Image (cartoon, rainbow, N blue to C red):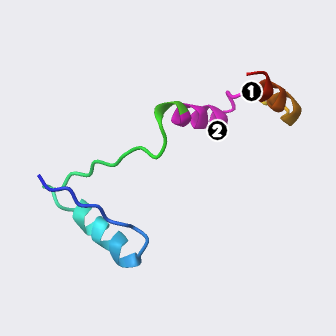
Amino acid sequence: MVTVKINEDSKQARALVEMLRTFPFVEFMEKPRYNKETEKAIVEARTGKAKKVSLEDFRKQLLSE
């Protein structure tokens, strides 16, 4: 097995990655962008399950810990 890191900032790099995805013998092992707790919080916020807190209450909560 070979590990290759490709910086996808350029047009050529993105084209190479798309070409590699077409090969049946290539497997991508992408790391999640955030940890599991953060991913869960993002999903909750997008679906409206997160509760809204005022800035003042948030500051009080931070300072009380």
Query: Would you say residue 43 sits in the magenta stretch?
Result: yes
Looking at the rendered structure, the kind of residue marked 2 is Arg
Using the numbered discs, state the Cα–Cα distance from disc 1 to disc 2 in whole angstroms.
Answer: 11 Å
Q: Badge 1, how many Cα within 10 Å: few under 14, some, many 20+?
A: few
Instruction: Name the spot of residue 38 as percent of width and height, x first.
Output: 55, 35
Q: Is residue 41 visible?
A: yes
Left or right? Give the position of 1 relative to 21: left
Magenta span: 38-51
Question: Where is mark 2, residue-wise?
Answer: 46
Q: Earlier in the sequence, mark 1 or mark 2?
A: 2
In the picture as drawn, the residue positioned furthest to the top comes out as: 64
Q: Residue at x 47, y 32 (%)?
A: 36
**In terms of secondary structure, where does tag 1 sit?**
loop
In this rendering, does residue 53 appear at all?
Answer: no
Q: Residue 12: which disc? A: none
Q: Nearer the viewer, mark 1 or mark 2?
A: 1
Residue occupied by mark 1: 51
Q: Mark 1 near mark 2, Cβ–Cβ under 8 Å?
A: no
Quadrant housing residue 18: bottom left
Position of residue 49 in the picture relative to residue 13 (left or right): right
